[in-house]
């Protein structure tokens, strides 16, 4: 869509659970609002259409990977039409706590091809900036236990039957996601930020990346994953 139609900015903060992503989104939103920018936040499972259905489907621990991917794509599509595009058209900044990249990585790790994932989300808007909070799986494990006291079934990849031990499954699943994100950093021009550090240090690095977006400059926004994503097919099959 032409920039004159969508004059707002789409900023994405990506990262695994425990990377400090949600904390950073909250801090960034507060900082930008103080600077006088209108902020609309979004994330996964926030559609009024299917978010509750996704939660119900995940409770039985029997949700098939393709069905999961399609449900999340529907969740994103509903938010895109009714929240993201209207907000951008109004000149607001849309701040996303995760975006299609997490969904694509999950699908690929569960056996889908990169081409299939790219086609599924080919209607998505390209962000003005995607920041990836990169934290080691061991750090993610420690933070998850400290915060929740246990490990989530899906965030541990237990549906993949990696290991009957949830700790081992978590570490391996997060390592696989991290490898897919590493590929995406090149294909989709992510900007990595070291998330193994204190939140204050992370926030300062994020601000250095975000604030220049508000200086006058020409921008381009297209639809769908960029052509650079075609650097090579995944070895997994859909």
Image: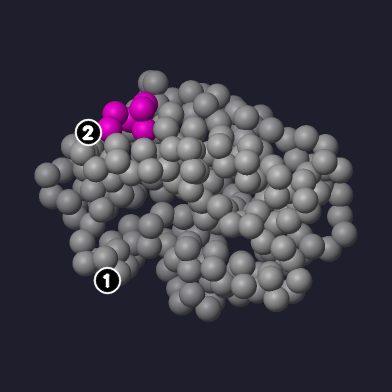
Q: Which contiguous range is marked in magenta?
A: 63-68
Per the image, label 1 sits on a secondary structure element best described as helix
Q: Residues within 10 Å of mark 1 (few under 14, many from 20)?
A: few
Q: Residue at x 87, y 59 (%)?
A: 216
On screen, residue 129 versus residue 140, left or right, reads: right
- Residue 7 coordinates in the image, percent (x, y): 81, 49
Please give the label number shown on residue 146. 1
What secondary structure predominates along the stretch shown in magenta? Answer: helix
Q: Residue 17 at what x, y percent from top left? A: 38, 57
Q: Who is closer to the viewer here, 235 or 39?
A: 39
Is residue 130 visible to us here? Answer: yes
Residue 65 lies in magenta, yes or no? yes
Observer-nearest of 197 and 68: 68
200 left or right, relative to 215: left
Question: SS for tag 2?
Answer: loop
Indicate the quadrant where residue 65 lies: top left
Rendered residue at 65%/74% (across/down):
31
Query: Of all residues shown, which one is farthest toward the front?
Result: 48
Q: Which residue is mark 2?
A: 62
Direction from residue 84 to residue 9 in the image, left or right: right
Q: Position of residue 223 (x, y in %)?
A: 69, 33
């Amino acid at each position: 869509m032409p920039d004159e139609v969508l004059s707002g900015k789409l900023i994405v903060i990506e990262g695994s659970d425990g990377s400090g992503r949600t904390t950073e989104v909250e801090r960034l939103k507060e900082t930008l609002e103080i600077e006088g920018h209108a902020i609309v936040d979004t994330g996964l499972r926030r559609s009024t259409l299917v978010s509750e259905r996704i939660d119900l489907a995940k409770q039985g621990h029997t949700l098939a990977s393709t069905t999961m991917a399609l449900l999340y794509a529907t969740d994103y599509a509903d938010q895109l039409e009714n929240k993201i595009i209207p907000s951008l058209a109004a000149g607001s900044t849309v701040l996303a706590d995760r975006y299609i990249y997490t969904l694509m990585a999950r699908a690929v790790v569960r056996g889908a091809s990169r081409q299939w994932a790219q086609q599924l989300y080919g209607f998505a808007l390209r962000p003005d900036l995607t920041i990836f909070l990169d934290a080691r799986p061991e750090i993610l494990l420690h933070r998850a236990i400290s915060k929740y006291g246990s490990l989530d079934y899906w965030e541990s990849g237990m549906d993949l039957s990696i290991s009957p031990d949830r700790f081992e499954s978590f570490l391996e699943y997060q390592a696989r996601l991290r490898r897919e994100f590493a590929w995406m950093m090149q294909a989709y021009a992510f900007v990595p930020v070291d998330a193994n550090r204190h939140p204050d240090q992370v926030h300062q690095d994020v601000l250095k990346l975000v604030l220049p977006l508000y200086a006058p400059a020409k921008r381009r926004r297209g639809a769908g994953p960029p052509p650079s994503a075609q650097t090579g097919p995944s070895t997994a099959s859909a």
